[in-house]
Structures are given as C-alpha cells and as structure tokens.
Image: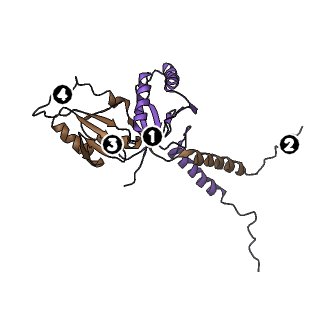
Amino acid sequence: MHISEPVRSRRRISLTPLVDVIFLLLMFFMLSSTFARFADLDVARQSTSAGEAALPPVAGPTDIRGAIVSVSADYRVRVNGIETALDDIADRLDVLYDRGARTAIVVADVSATVQDLVSVLERARRSRIALAIAQ
Amino acid sequence: MRLPPQPSGSPVEPTLALINVVFLLLLFFVVTGTIVYQHDRSILPPTSMLLNPGKAPVDGIYIDAEGTLKFRGEVQGTAGIARALNAGAESDPVARTVQVVADRRLRAQTLLAIVKELKSHGLTSLSIVTVRDDRP
C-alpha cells in the first residue's frame, strides 16, 4: 500500500487579518483613552486634623492662636483679615506659624467656587500649618 | 548576448514594517492612556498646578455645576451613594478613598455641605479630583 505524502503547502501566513485586528485595537485605545493628568486633593482627612491635643508646645512668644483663611470669588483670599495674593498664601501662613498659629481654618464664602477653594487649598498645603476646612 | 533572467515573483510588500509601526502605536496608547470610566463630559474638574499626579477617577461621585449628584450614571442622594459604597466596602475590607469629581463652577459651600453629608454617612476618606494644568 502506498501512502502519498501530505501535500506541503508553501503559502505564507496571511497577515491581513492580523493587521485588521491590531488596527481595531489601536482605534479602540486611541478613542477611549484620555491624557488628562488627574490629581487628588484630600478633603476629609484635613478637616479632622484640627485636634488641639496633639499640638506641640510653642517656644517663644505666642501672640497668635490660629489663622482664618477666607476664600471669595475670583481667587480673592484674606488671611486673618488681610488681603493676600494667591501665591503668597503659604508664606503668609508660615509667618503666622512662626508666631504660634498651628491650625488654619479655611472658610469659603457664598461667592467662592470649587475652583477657588481648590486653588487656595493646594497652595496653603505647602505651609507647615495644619489645615481644617470649615463645613 | 544572454541577459540574466529577471527575478520572478511579486515584489515583497512592506507589510511587516507596517505591522511594526501599528503595533508600536498600539503599545503606546495602551501604556500611556487611561480608559475613561463613566466620565461625565459636562463636568469640568478644577485645575491644579501643585498637586502630585494621581489616578483618573474610578467609581467616583460626580457633582455638576448645579450640585446634582451622580453616581454610577444615576442621579442619587448622598445616603444612597454611601449605602452603595459601604456595601462594597464590607466585601473589600481595605478602606479606599472615594473620589469626588466636582465641577469647577460649583459653589464651594455646596460642595462642602455634600462632603459633610457623605462623611456623616460613614465615608470618611474623600478626595477632590483635579486636572493638572502645567501651563506656566
């Protein structure tokens, strides 16, 4: 009995379906992905950190107990009643820290938007003072 | 005079090179992109410049400029959202931070009132999602 040898196909593998699939995947990821870079700002943790029991003893004159940062519309900020530029908030709070203040309470007034609040908070976080958000 | 025979067969198309390039593009998008999950396009998160980059919002609480809360695509109250999140937290004991995506035009007092309500319902770890703006 004679068994014929299997016919060996010499055809090359077709690459077109592969390219199709890869191209569809490419389209999917291009359309569904975003390149916006997100960042998180903690709000709950800061507002509970106003505990006064844990405050370290202050050396030197303590003429200021705390700071109040009030936020209004268009990034208008007042630190303890003094109008402060947005980029000077951290420096201003550090001055108050050196004079004995340990906690700054951030108060948003009626006109302030979320953008105002976030801009102020992210700058005030650079200061050594502990932040609390009035709610 | 005898000419050398012409090489037979069709010229090889640059298919492999094409696939290489497309494949590299695919890898690029897979690695660098983040798939948007139920992102409400009408909500513009506030911009920030100084915060460390974090993750894109996943399963976040969305608040539009009028103060309407949306969670998992549905308008819900704070109690319902807290119930849904706390139910998931029981099966997953690792406490995770809940991300709040608030519109930048929302009144800050409204946001703080909502945050306070959420906290009173047991969601103690909350963060506001911002979009980093690197423009000088």
**Is the residue marked by circle 2 packed among few (<14), some (14-19), or many (20+) residues within 10 Å?**
few
Residue found 51% across the figure and 34% down from its top: B68
| Whether residue B128 can be seen here | yes
Mark 2 or 3, which is nearer the eye?
Answer: 3
Residue A59, compared with residue B28, is above or below; it is: above
Dot 1: chain letter: B
The three-letter amino acid code for the residue at tag 2 is: Ser
Q: How far apart are labels 1 and 4 at the CA level?
A: 37 Å
Please check whether the numbered discs 3 and 1 fall on a single chain. Answer: no
Quarter of the image with the C terminus of chain B is bottom left
Q: Is label 2 on the same chain as label 3? A: yes
Q: Which chain is purple?
A: B
Query: Which residue in the protein does label 4 denote?
Result: A56
- Please identify the residue farthest to the top as the structure is shown: B90
Q: Quadrant of the N terminus of chain B?
A: bottom right
Q: Nearer the viewer, residue A13 or A18?
A: A18
Image x and y of residue B92, in percent: 49, 22
What color does chain A have in the rendering?
Answer: brown
Residue B3's spot in the image, x, y percent? Answer: 75, 76
Q: Residue at x 39, y 54 (%)?
A: B135
* 1 and 4 marks on the same chain: no
**Label 1 belongs to which residue?**
B106
| Residue most extreme to the front | A110
Residue type beneath disc 4:
Pro
Q: Which mark is residue A4?
A: 2
